[in-house]
Image (cartoon, rainbow, N blue to C red):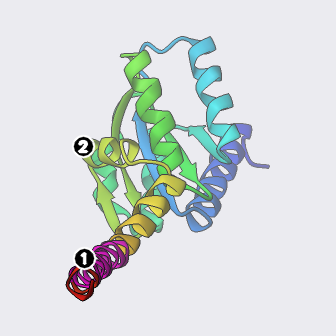
Amino acid sequence: MKKLSLIFKETSEKLLKDNLKGSQGIFVIDYTKLSSPDLSALRQSLKSAKSQLFVVKNSIARRALKAASLDSLLERIAGPCGIVFAKEEPVSISKILYGFSKEHENLRLQGGFLKDKILEKKDIEALALLPAKEVLRAQLVMALKSPITGLVMVLHHTLGKIVYCLEEIKKKKDVKVT
């Protein structure tokens, strides 16, 4: 019969591997000296963004990352670390992590993985500082709409000048006729 600790390690590793396969991105954090209530608050805010924070032994995390061919993240696994899995929207999760790290200096962003790119701390911060998706869409629509609006305004003013000229010509001809 297997030891309970071995069963726990195997289950944890399987759970990590499954979450690695189903996530759009992952973030590695260092939570040294972070209090238990603060860690719980972080978990709750991540849960609202449909993501999970896993705190596992480094050896288990390294094996799972190696099995998922994420060898470049292995160097970021040191000390007490947690792995955050982004199931849906990685940008909102980076905003949560960045905001929480600003409020709690004991939480440090170590790095992450998004699509096919390894993220450094500065990349996660850049993601967090992006405007919301709706704002970006509005900016795109305005950028696409701007040249057309400018053309309409120029044509409107040109037509206005033509009408003004014709009105002045009409006035001059009316004056000469009388």
Q: Would residue 100 be seen by someone viewing this image from the given angle?
A: yes
Q: Residue at x 56, y 53 (%)?
A: 86
Q: Earlier in the sequence, mark 1 or mark 2?
A: 2
- SS at mark 2 in the image: helix
User: Callout 2: few (<14), some (14-19), or many (20+) C-alpha neighbours within 10 Å?
Assistant: few
Figure label count? 2
Residue 129 pos. (x, y %): 36, 42
128 above or below 90? above
Which residue was labeled with disc 2?
122
Residue 161's label in the rendered image is 1
Q: Looking at the image, which residue sits at the far right?
A: 1
Looking at the image, residue 36 sits to the left or right of residue 116; the answer is: right
Could you tell me how far apart the alpha carbons at marks 1 and 2 are, in whole angstroms?
54 Å
Residue flagged by tag 2: what amino acid is it?
Lys
Q: Residue at x 64, y 62 (%)?
A: 18
Looking at the image, residue 114 sits to the left or right of residue 119; the answer is: right
Residue flagged by tag 1: what amino acid is it?
Lys
> Pointer 1 and pointer 2: residues touching (CB < 8 Å)?
no
- SS at mark 1 in the image: helix
Q: Which residues are magenta?
A: 147-172
Name the main secondary structure of what is drawn in magenta: helix
Residue 73 pos. (x, y %): 33, 54
Give residue 145's quadrant in the image.
Answer: bottom left
Residue 9's label in the rendered image is none
